[in-house]
Structures are given as structure tokens and as C-alpha cells.
Amino acid sequence: MEKKELPFKRVLLKLSGEAFGGQKGHGIDPDFLRYIANEIKKVRELGVQLAIVVGGGNIFRGIQGEDIGIDRATGDYMGMLATLINALALQNALENIANIPTRVLSALEIRAVAEPYIRRRAIRHLEKGRVVIFGAGTGNPFFSTDTAAALRAAEIKADLIIKATKVDGIYTDDPKKNPNAKKIEEISYMEALNKGLKVMDPTALTLAKENKIPILVLNIFKENNLLKAVKGEKVGSLVRE
């Protein structure tokens, strides 16, 4: 498939920290790193420009800090540092397992381990065929990595946001708890907001809506789902106007 045939030239993938934790849900699972590196390799071989926003919940969530007496802002900064740990682990996997040139750009300036986030630099890396990993969220407390994903997608003019999850799309209720939950194939931003569906947080959904970036929610643990998504094949659940 030639690049011009692709429905999406530039895609932003949101990977949760929970995914990095594998079956345990915490720490960094080497099996997941190998798996996701190979899934990303298939996408890159098509010629898709891929940027990734990573979460840090497998290591530390800002909101958890409040339970142990850490104020929310400090906890959120700790969470941002956790995302950088995941970003570096993913970079290492992509370069050593899949032989993909990768750059980590951080919203917090930590020059020893990552480049500072500069929008034009990020776009240039993508144009050169490098996978770009955005770490440290937005660089601000009180904003989720979902919001960081929507923000970065808008900044780099991504054609699609892929929200990688453990379920195969959006449901009317938690399918693990409610066997009667129904899958939603397609829904508008406003419907998702009004129904309080856990697609992304409201700030992220609003950002995506304002910038007309569709959001595709899929099961990242089903092999080739990512590949099917960037090729425009039917997979997961779509949020758009």
C-alpha cells in the first residue's frame, strides 16, 4: 500500500500506563513492550507517521498521592515523571526490538533523558519517519494524559487519535460488570459527553471536537488491531461529529 492510499497520514496513539503493566497492571511488562513494538512496526512500515502519548498509572497516578498526604499538584508532577519512565522503556523497545528510530519529547525539561517538547521539532521528526513519544503529559498539573493526547494531536495536526484500551470499543456500561452492556459502533462527541461515556475525559473530548479529530477506541491487545485501524478497516468504536 502506498502512502497516498492511506486514509490517515498522521496518527496519535494514546497508550495507558496500565497497558505497560501487563497482566499485573503495575511495573513494566517486557512482554507488552515486545508486543507493542512489533505492532507499531507494522504501522510504520505502511508509511504512517506515528506519535504516541503514554500514561504513567502503572507507576504512579497523581490522584493517588492525595491518599498518602501528597498535594494534588505535587502528585501530578510525580505522575508526569512516571510517564517519562514508560516513554524511555518504549523508546528502548522500539529501537532495539523493532529497529525504529524514535524520539522522546518531554513537556518537562529533563535534557539528560529527553528532548524538550517543541511543536515544530516534533513535526519535523515525524516527517523524517521517526516515531515520536510525548512524555510528561501537558507539563501542567490537573490535566490528564488523555487531555495531553488531544492537545498534542491538535498541535501536530493528527488525522486520528487512537485510544488503546483492554476492551474492543465503547460500551453503554462496563462490559466486564454488566453482560447486557451494548457496544457503540459510532457516536458523536456531544453524545459521548452528554452520556458521560468513559471515552476520554471531558476536556480531551472537547479539544478533539473543537479540532475535528476523530477518536477511535480499540483493544490494543488484539493483534493487528492497530494495523487495521490505520488502514481504515472497521475496528473498535469511533467518536466524531
Image: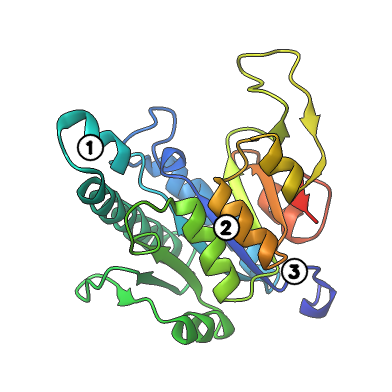
Residue contact at pointers 1 and 3, CB within 8 angstroms: no
Q: Residue at x 80, y 70 (%)?
A: 6
Helix, strand or loop under label 1: helix
Instruction: Give the labeled residue for mark 3.
Output: 8
Residue 52, how many percent across, how many down?
51, 62
Helix, strand or loop under label 2: strand
Left or right: where 200 falls relative to 237: left
Q: Residue at x 33, y 64 (%)?
A: 139
Q: Depth-wise, is mark 1 or mark 2 nearer the camera?
A: 1
What amino acid is at disc 1?
Gly
Residue contact at pointers 1 and 2, CB within 8 angstroms: no
Q: Quadrant of the C terminus?
A: bottom right
Instruction: Give the labeled residue for mark 1.
Output: 65
Dot 3 or dot 2, earlier in sequence:
3
Residue contact at pointers 3 and 2, CB within 8 angstroms: no
Instruction: Give the labeled residue for mark 2.
Output: 13
Dot 1 or dot 3, earlier in sequence:
3
Q: Residue at x 32, y 77 (%)?
A: 116
Q: Nearer the viewer, residue 231 or 164?
A: 164
Q: Is residue 18 above or below residue 126?
A: above
What amino acid is at disc 2?
Leu
Q: Residue at x 60, y 49 (%)?
A: 163
Whole-angstrom CA distance, mark 3 to mark 2, is 12 Å
